[in-house]
Image (cartoon, rainbow, N blue to C red):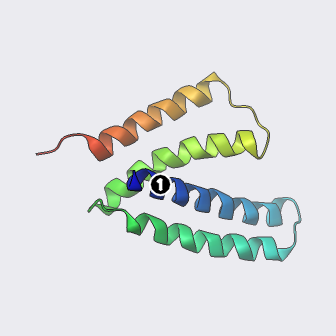
Amino acid sequence: MKAVILFLLAGLAEIGGGYLVWLTIKENKPIGYAIAGSLILVLYGIIPALQSFPSFGRVYAAYGGVFIVLAVLWGWAIDKKVPDVYDWVGAFICLIGVTVMLWAPRS
């Protein structure tokens, strides 16, 4: 459960921080948005290091799948862009990959 929570926190930090920078550059929001977003992105860099898995590459590869799912959900909830069936199928495939990478039995 800790792994899932850390992946979700990392995803929200990366997407949320990036979104604030995006708003500054693309939608002319005040520079404070970009500064806050940048600070949140620093947190994103720290959160995955709290995972108990010993392999940096495996953690970040698995996180990539979680990020994809969260990005689809963020786009739907925040940007009001309704995902289509291919978005959902792709997100599901990514979650299968995350599960295999992190929790497959290894010798």
What residue sits 46% from the left and 58% below the top?
6
**Label 1: few (<14), some or many (≥20) within 10 Å?**
few
Q: Residue placed farthest to the left in the image?
A: 107
Q: Report whether 3 appears left or right of 46.
A: left
Residue 60 in the image: state x and y as whole percent.
41, 56
What residue sits 56% from the left and 41% below the top?
69
Amino acid type at image mark 1: Ile
Quadrant location of residue 43?
A: bottom right
Q: Report whether 53 appears left or right of 1.
A: left
Residue located beneath label 1 in the image: 5
State whether residue 8 is above or below residue 76. Answer: below
State whether residue 20 is above or below residue 62. Answer: below
Residue 98 in the image: state x and y as whole percent.
39, 42
State whether residue 73 is above or below residue 50. Answer: above
What residue sits 78% from the left and 45% below the top?
79
Residue 35 in the image: state x and y as whole percent.
73, 77
